[in-house]
Image (spheres, rainbow, N blue to C red):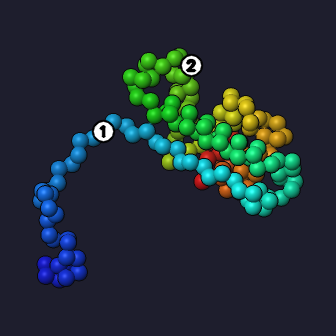
Amino acid sequence: QPNRLREVCPNLLAPSVGAEMHPVAAPRQGKQARSVPALALVTEEELRGTPQYMRSRLDIAKVNAALQEVGTLLKQRYALLSMSAAQLRAASEADRKRHATLKALEDSTTKGLFFLTEDDLKQSGSVVRQDATGKNLLSVLRHVGRLKEFKHQGMRCWHTR
């Protein structure tokens, strides 16, 4: 049997140079910060592919500015969520309260998703506002596949695909 394994996988049974026969598990590090994936900018072709009623008067600059704002909001959200207990104790009271509310939204349905809520968009309020233009921006980003909308705990939420 070992000869057959050597034929199929010659490096399988040979110990690597400088390696021990029984590797020792590396010591556990602290909690790793989840890195938010970069969102690809929307191209002109993708924007032209969306229906006119959906994009109305939006141009590529506004759509990409909204996408970059969403990316910034996601980075801020998950930077706050990845704070250690010591960093959290040193943070302001508002940050601790925000951390608690964000942590309450994390459950088994949102595990592994990078998402933001309506409240996150309301608090930022620069490009993606809760007006007709902001709603059009979100629908265009949904249509081109950058965001996906879902309901969670009675709120509209969007996650990266």
Residue name at image x 52 percent, y 27 percent: 100
Where the N terminus falls, by quadrant?
bottom left
Across and down, in percent, residue 7 comes to 19, 82
Residue for badge 1? 29
Across and down, in percent, residue 11 comes to 20, 72
**Numbered mark located on residue 45 in the image:** none
- In the rendered structure, the answer to whether residue 87 lies left or right of residue 115 reads left
Q: Residues within 10 Å of mark 1 (few under 14, many from 20)?
A: few
The answer to whether residue 139 of the structure is visible from this angle is no
Across and down, in percent, residue 128 comes to 74, 38
> In front: 45, or 74?
45
Residue name at image x 14 percent, y 65 percent: 15
Across and down, in percent, residue 56 comes to 87, 50
The answer to whether residue 123 of the structure is visible from this angle is yes
Residue for badge 2? 94
Q: Find residue 129 and report its image quarter.
A: top right
